[in-house]
Amino acid sequence: MKKSQKTQTALVDAVIEMINKGEKISVSSISKKSKTAYGTFYRYFNNLDEIHHASIIKVVTGAAEVVDLELRNEKSNLFKIYYSWYVAIRLYQDEYMANWLIANPNSINEAWVLTQPMTSQFLADAIAQKEEPDLSKDNLRHFKMSQTYIFWTYQNALRELLKGRKTIHVYSDLMNSVNLINLPRKTHKKYIQRVQRFVDKQ
């Protein structure tokens, strides 16, 4: 990694660390935390909004990598999709992180868009492997059409978490109210329950 990339990464990582600790974000605090000069910040970002955006992108793409790691031995692509939605909600279980993401809805929505190719590929693979009898390209078309709307529901999920509800309960309520792949109801519930059992074992 080039020195410039290391510096930019240090700045972004400093923001994420401070958010997790509930610390106030400013150019001065970021510079101090990242051990960089005050003016260095402006070589990479024009303002705080830009570094918040970059930090959120890193948090969300990092969550996608977590799905790959935790499910490296999982054969069901449909389960990977359902579990990835749980991981997305799990991002918000910390109060500081949740409030930060709520305050930056455009950035979080853009970040989720970056994960769409991964989940779409999971579904395409599930269709190719005929994981469920009625699964077809119609499900993929429905999924791509409906993906945008899941981002709106995450905002409500965030608020539910801030009330102190458990992540898995918020996930279950959300998934029982939407069927983004348009699977038969029984099949849809089967994967929700699989995620619940998987989480209970963790």
Image (cartoon, helix red, strand yellow):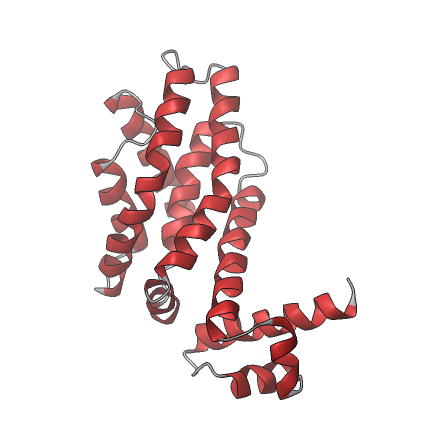
Left or right relative to 24: residue 161:
left
Residue closest to the eye, 23 or 42: 42
Where residue 121 appears, as percent x and y from the top left, is 52, 29
Q: Nearer the viewer, residue 160 or 5?
A: 5
Q: How many marks?
A: 0
Residue at the far front in the pictured view: 46
Percent coordinates x, y for residue 36 in the rendering: 67, 83
Relative to 152, say whether 194 is above or below. above
Q: Is residue 116 above or below residue 155?
A: above
- Is residue 91 something that shows in the picture? no
- The percent coordinates of residue 76 (x first, y second) are 49, 27
Q: Residue at left 50%, top 45%?
A: 114
Q: Which quadrant is the N terminus positioned in?
A: bottom right
**Residue under the point 48% across and 31% down:** 120
Identity of the residue drawn at 30% across and 41% down? 149
- Residue at point 43% right, 83% down? 24
- Residue 52 on image: x %, y %: 48, 68
Tell me if 77 is positioned left or right of 43 in this view.
left
Q: Is residue 108 left or right of residue 6?
A: left
